[in-house]
Structures are given as structure tokens and as C-alpha cells.
């Protein structure tokens, strides 16, 4: 009888150890596994948005950064577009996109912007303030402060309501960001 009791006790101890270890391993691995696909999936959605927004462009180069600008716990996409379609002597186009259900919507369509792009600790109308570098097109270089007006960020950082600032925040996109090339898919049969 003592042999059965010993085996039963040993089985309970082993079962308790394996149950205690299993959730701990799952919990510690889950956040890392969930965090990576989330941005990868979101980037794929952003790419679909770009292809729909600019159907006339065969390929485009972009740099992408993520930051929770409105404090809702979901990152917005800051997309700096580069190439002849998006750039002129004053700079290039930067989009600020927020999730709207399964889609993305623009809360910033900023022309003549340059990198670096930073996010400040200050907020306006519930959204974090941004800075973009500006220069070229005959103007002196510097950094423009972009404040959310309740609907969008200013579309042109070289005129009011944007203002020049010496304050820089946390860098989202460096001066020379890594670019991704997005090719428009050709219709089948071409």
C-alpha cells in the first residue's frame, strides 16, 4: 500500500511542477510572439493603403515608423514617401495614418517634409506633437513643429499653423532612414 501511496504522491508532485511551469513559459513567450506579427500585419495593411491611395505609381519608396500618437494604445503609422512623385525641391510627402477599424485613414498628409521626424512629449487636442525637418525650395533649414488641430496635422510645415522650433523629440525616422520599395502588382496576364 505504501508503494501505491508513494507513486500517487510522486505523480501529484510531478503534475504540479509541470502545470506550474507550462503557464509561466506561455505567458513569457506570448507578448513577444504577439508584438512582432502585429506590426508586420499592420505594415502589410499600410502597403495596401498606399497602393490604393496612389494607383498611378508603379513603385514607391517609403520609410515607416510606429508611435501611439493619440494615447489609445494603438500605434499610428508615420510613412515618409520618397521619389519623383512625392518629392520636390522643398522635401517629400509624409503621411500620418491611424487605424479606422480594419482600414487606415489619413490624419496627416504633410508636404515638403524632410527627415528626421520626431515625436514630442507635448500634445495638442489629444495627439502628440511632431517635428519634421524643412529646407530647400529657397527657405532656410530648420525644424517645423506640427500640432494636431482636432482633425489633422498641418499639411504644409513651412506655413502657419506650423511653426519653427528648436525643440526636438524622440526620433521616429532618422535623417537617412532605411527605405522599403513597394512595387504595384501588375494585373494577371500582363
Image (cartoon, rainbow, N blue to C red):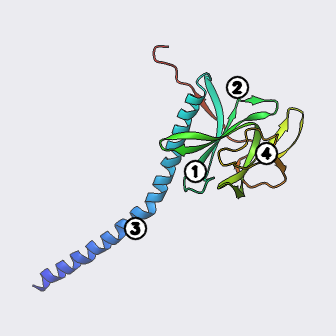
> Is residue 103 rendered to the left or right of residue 7?
right
Q: Distance from label 2 to label 3 (Cα)?
A: 51 Å
Question: Where does the image place residue 168, in percent across and percent down from the top left?
Answer: 78, 54
Res 187 label: none
| Disc 2 residue crowd, few under 14, some 14–19, many 20+, Cα 10 Å | some
Q: Residue at x 52, y 20 (%)?
A: 186
Numbered disc 3: secondary structure: helix
Q: In the rendered image, which residue does mark 3 sit on?
A: 24
Q: Residue at x 78, y 34 (%)?
A: 91
> Are circles 2 and 3 on residues that touch, CB within 8 Å?
no
Residue 56 lies, with reference to residue 103, above or below; the image says above
Q: Is residue 175 among the parts visible in the rendering?
A: no
**Count of marks, rendered view:** 4
Q: In the rendered image, which residue does mark 4 sit on?
A: 161
Residue 46 lies, with reference to residue 36, above or below; the image says above
Work out whether mark 4 precedes mark 2 in sequence or the reverse, and give the earlier one: 2
**Of the residues tagged 2 and 3, which is closer to the observer?**
2
Quadrant in the picture for residue 73: bottom right
Residue 19 lies, with reference to residue 31, above or below; the image says below
Q: Distance from label 4 to label 2 (Cα)?
A: 25 Å
Q: Residue at x 75, y 30 (%)?
A: 87
Q: In the rendered image, which residue does mark 1 sit on?
A: 75
| Disc 4 residue crowd, few under 14, some 14–19, many 20+, Cα 10 Å | some
Amino acid at each position: 500500500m505504501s508503494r501505491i501511496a508513494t507513486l500517487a504522491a510522486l505523480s501529484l508532485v510531478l503534475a504540479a511542477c509541470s502545470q506550474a511551469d507550462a503557464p509561466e513559459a506561455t505567458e513569457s513567450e506570448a507578448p513577444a510572439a504577439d508584438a512582432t506579427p502585429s506590426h508586420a500585419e499592420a505594415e502589410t495593411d499600410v502597403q495596401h493603403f498606399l497602393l490604393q491611395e496612389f494607383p498611378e505609381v508603379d513603385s514607391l519608396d517609403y520609410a515607416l515608423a510606429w508611435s501611439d500618437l493619440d494615447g489609445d494604445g494603438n500605434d499610428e503609422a508615420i510613412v515618409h514617401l520618397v521619389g519623383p512623385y512625392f518629392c520636390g525641391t522643398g522635401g517629400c510627402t509624409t503621411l500620418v495614418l491611424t487605424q479606422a477599424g480594419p482600414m487606415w485613414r489619413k490624419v496627416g498628409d504633410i508636404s515638403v517634409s524632410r527627415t528626421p521626424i520626431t515625436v514630442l512629449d507635448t500634445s495638442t487636442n489629444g495627439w502628440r506633437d511632431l517635428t519634421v525637418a524643412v529646407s530647400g525650395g529657397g527657405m532656410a533649414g530648420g525644424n517645423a513643429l506640427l500640432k494636431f488641430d482636432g482633425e489633422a496635422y498641418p499639411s504644409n510645415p513651412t506655413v502657419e499653423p506650423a511653426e519653427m522650433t528648436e525643440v526636438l523629440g524622440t526620433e521616429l525616422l532618422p535623417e537617412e532612414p532605411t527605405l522599403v520599395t513597394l512595387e504595384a502588382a501588375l494585373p494577371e496576364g500582363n
